[in-house]
Amino acid sequence: MVKKKKAFPEEGEFVIGTITKISSHGAYATLDEFDNKEGLIHISEIASTWVRNIRNYVREKQKVVAKVLRIDAAKEQVDLSLRRVTNAMRRNKITEWKRSQKADNLLELVAKQLDKTKEEAYDAVGWPLEEKFGEIYAGFEETHEKGEKALEKAGINEEWINTVVELAKAHVTIRKVKLTKIVELQSFKPDGIEIIKDALKRGLKSTRSKDVTLEVNLVGSPRYRFSVQANDYKTAEKVLDKAVKGTITAIEKGGGKGQFEEEA
């Protein structure tokens, strides 16, 4: 089972859940990444439209992507929402989940080859890779490309290095992750076009990063599509957010307006 280092998700985080029970007031789901802790999706958070029958939207044993609204760790209560998850957010979380599953499988292989438990593999390899690279599978990808140097950077003990490198080389395939956002930029000054161009240049300049490709294309004035490709989701998300925020900050400093939306 895919594991998270922390016991509970954070408010605003997207999680994978499995619907276990449906009642008149909502649906209950176990949180697959958090030791199957239970969360509640109130009927008002099932869909954006009026919900007469919850079973028209979810069913028992169904996997869902939900947004965490509130957490009461003392009572182990987690409130979730389905209606606040866009298609783009859902796709991104599913991609992240699949990568977590691949990482979990690799750690299990590492443990078996070294006659260790999977918990020991997480402690010795998984969590250090997550700490260094932001995601366990991203650490395996780095190991696939750079070998033992990547593991040494993460502080992995020598006992584990050769096995991890061998399995990363054999089982990891590097695939680019692509994320997009639509940004609206407006300036009503006489030199508004130049202000917008300058804002875009500043946004792109702020995100120069190795192994990351960032493009901006005009969708139709005043909308621009920001697209980023990276080896892993977290890197792509970080670069895209920085580019969008940098552009909006620049346009606002020039007296214009900027806002963004997730592309469906």
Image (cartoon, rainbow, N blue to C red):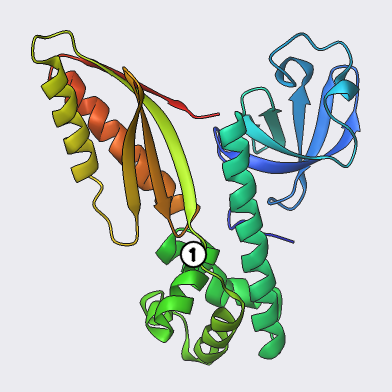
Give left or right: position of 96 versus 131.
Answer: right
Give left or right: position of 147 versus 213.
Answer: right
Judge by depth and name the residue closer to the eye, 25 or 229. 229
Query: Eyeballing the image, is 48 above or below 242?
Result: above
Quickly name the residue at label 1: 138
Element class at badge 1: helix
Q: Position of residue 9 (x, y in %)?
A: 60, 43
Judge by depth and name the residue closer to the eye, 169 or 222. 222
Q: Position of residue 153 (x, y in %)?
A: 36, 76
- Identified at 47% across, 85% down, the residue is 157
Q: In terms of image quadrants, where is residue 260?
A: top left
Q: Position of residue 214 (x, y in %)?
A: 33, 46
Judge by depth and name the residue closer to the eye, 223 or 131. 223
Judge by depth and name the residue closer to the eye, 256 or 19. 256
Q: Position of residue 158 (x, y in %)?
A: 47, 90
Residue 8 visible here: no
Query: Eyeballing the image, is 164 above or below 82?
Result: below
Q: In terms of image quadrants, where is residue 66?
A: top right
- Identified at 69% across, 51% down, the residue is 33
Q: Callout 1, which amino acid?
A: Ala
Q: Residue furthest left?
A: 191
Q: In terms of image quadrants, where is residue 203?
A: top left
Quadrant containing the C terminus is top right
- Identified at 67% across, 61% down, the residue is 101
Query: Eyeballing the image, is 254 above or below 129?
Result: above
Crowding around mark 1 (Cα neighbors within 10 Å: few <14, some 14 to 19, many 20+) is many
- Identified at 11% across, 23% down, the residue is 194
Quadrant containing the N terminus is bottom right
